[in-house]
Amino acid sequence: MMNKNINIYNSQDEYLAQMKSGALLNPRIDSTFKALFTQPTAESRNALHSFLEAATERKIKSVELTANEAPIAFEKQRGVSYDILCIFDDGQPANLEMMAFNQFYDYGKRAEYQVARLETTYLKKGDTWEKAPKVYQITVLDFVFDKSSNDAVSRYAMRTDDNRELSNTLNIIFIELPKVTKLENSIEKNTALENWAIFLKEADNPKKAKVIEKLTEQEAGLMNAKQSLSSISANQDLWVEQFRQEMFERDIRSGLSAAENIGLERGLKKGRTEAKLDDARNMLLKNVGSIEQIAEVTGLPEEKIKELAEEI
């Protein structure tokens, strides 16, 4: 189902009028989420520091942003592009990302692969196993991942069936934003990360202004996050990117709906692969996503998407 917070605008200019009215950007859009935490300002740095401490449940002296591409170890190895890759003062890495809408692939396996690549990237040749860094994959999801649980925050690590821990080295944290509504009445009792989840879900919602005010009064890191979000909300480029992302989501949802209605007929006439190629061509023509996004949505290799882009 399409994100209910997305409004319908007839043009980009009409959309940009929000910026002039003083509205806040949607922090659940990937580009805004990254900008919120990566600006060269004290507010942005403090917000990132606060969020990471809440997510990892540990004190962090300092955080450094680093390159977002994992090195390739062998030919044809699948690449990994991290969103906000951080290194803590003790050398432990964490990747922070936002998934704005459900693209219907296996997020569990994806997260396991990402956290495993983090581990292999930061364990140096010659290091003893004791020096293997504790690594974190922190994923904010603006959709429900685990329908069997009502918890907004889920923490995954390698354990036995009776909950005995293996080494606590590989850590995956999922934050499911649709589940935070029930937490708005227990702000004083929530964990720090649960309150961060409320902020990310409702920061741009004028109807939740009192909730956000209560959050920011309680936690300095959230106050810094609101200040950072307010600052970047004056950036027209980010509004344009948000417009494109919301159009992309709308097109994907429309495409999925159409596929459900005519999928059988289309599959019989063209075959599954040809249908995916058609979807990819349409997305490229409409400029509604990056090569990587289109590849993830259609299931086609990135190399094939690049070939189609060159043809177009």
Image (spheres, helix red, strand yellow):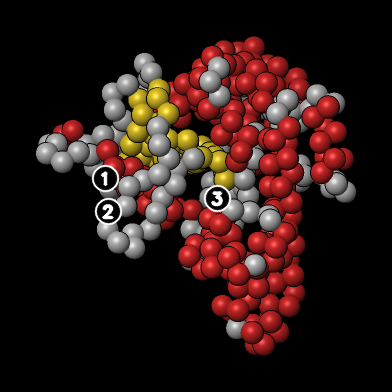
Where, quadrant-wise, is the C terminus in this rendering?
Answer: bottom right
Question: Does residue 156 appear in the picture of this structure?
Answer: no
Residue 180 percent across, percent down from the top left: 63, 35
Number of residues whose C-alpha sits closer than 10 Å to that of mark 3, classed few (under 14), some (14–19) or many (20 or more): some
Q: Nearer the viewer, residue 179 or 267?
A: 267
Q: Nearer the viewer, residue 101 or 32?
A: 32
Residue 192 percent across, percent down from the top left: 52, 23
Q: Amino acid at mark 1?
A: Thr
Residue under the image location 60 percent in, 13 percent down: 218
Question: Does residue 262 appear in the picture of this structure?
Answer: yes
Q: Which mark is residue 145?
A: 3
Number of residues whose C-alpha sits closer than 10 Å to that of mark 1, classed few (under 14), some (14–19) or many (20 or more): some
Where, quadrant-wise, is the N terminus in this rendering?
Answer: bottom right
Q: Amino acid at mark 2?
A: Ala
Name the front one of labels 1 and 3.
Answer: 1
Contact check, label 1 and label 3, Cβ < 8 Å = no
How many labels sit on residues? 3
Q: Which mark is residue 120?
A: 1
Distance between the Cα atoms at labels 1 and 2? 10 Å
**Is residue 73 toward the left or the right of residue 192 in the image?**
left
Contact check, label 1 and label 2, Cβ < 8 Å = yes
Residue under the image location 65 percent in, 73 percent down: 278
Of callouts 1 and 2, the N-terminal one: 2
Q: Report which quarter residue 169 is drawn in.
A: top left
Name the front one of labels 3 and 2.
Answer: 2
Number of residues whose C-alpha sits closer than 10 Å to that of mark 2, classed few (under 14), some (14–19) or many (20 or more): few
